[in-house]
Each structure stands twice: as structure tokens, then as C-alpha cells.
Amino acid sequence: MDGYASVLISIAIWKACGYFLGKFAPEGVAA
């Protein structure tokens, strides 16, 4: 269960990073 939680946290962090990159640097996400 701990490993599963770690994966969910990692995905949440990546989604948050992608959201902020898309918001502040759209050209960086187009790749």
C-alpha cells in the first residue's frame, strides 16, 4: 500500500508540474 501511495504522490507531483509549466511556459509543454 505504501508503494501504491508513493506512485500516486509521484503522479500528483508530475501533474502539478505539468500544470504550472503549461500555465507559465506553454512552449515548454508542446514537446
Image (cartoon, rainbow, N blue to C red):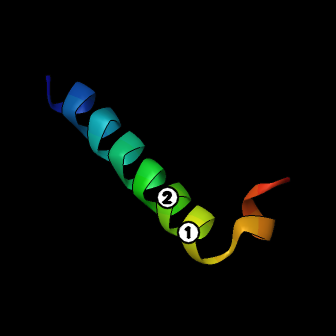
In the rendered image, which residue does mark 2 sit on?
19
Residue 8, labelled with which disc?
Answer: none
Q: Is residue 21 above or below residue 12?
A: below
Helix, strand or loop for disc 1: helix
Q: CA distance from mark 2 to mark 1?
A: 6 Å
Q: Nearer the viewer, residue 2 or 15?
A: 15
Q: Nearer the viewer, residue 11 or 20?
A: 20
Q: Nearer the viewer, residue 2 or 8?
A: 8
What residue is drawn where x is 25% and y is 26%? 4
Q: Is residue 17 above or below residue 31?
A: below
Q: Residues within 10 Å of mark 2 (few under 14, many from 20)?
A: some
Residues at circles 2 and 1 in contact by the CB criterion of under 8 Å: yes
Given the current orientation, which residue lies at the most extreme left position? Answer: 1
Helix, strand or loop for disc 2: helix
Q: Amino acid at mark 2?
A: Tyr
Q: Amino acid at mark 1?
A: Lys
Q: Is residue 5 above or below residue 23?
A: above
Residue 23, labelled with which disc?
Answer: 1
**Residue 22, position as x, y percentages in the image:** 61, 62
The answer to whether residue 17 is left or right of residue 30 is left
Q: Residues within 10 Å of mark 1 (few under 14, many from 20)?
A: few
The answer to whether residue 14 is left or right of residue 10 is right
Given the current orientation, which residue lies at the most extreme bottom position? Answer: 24
Q: Is residue 24 above or below residue 22?
A: below
What residue is drawn where x is 34% and y is 46%? 12
What residue is drawn where x is 49% and y is 58%? 19
Q: Quadrant of residue 24?
A: bottom right
The answer to whether residue 30 is left or right of residue 16 is right
For the N terminus, which image quadrant?
Answer: top left
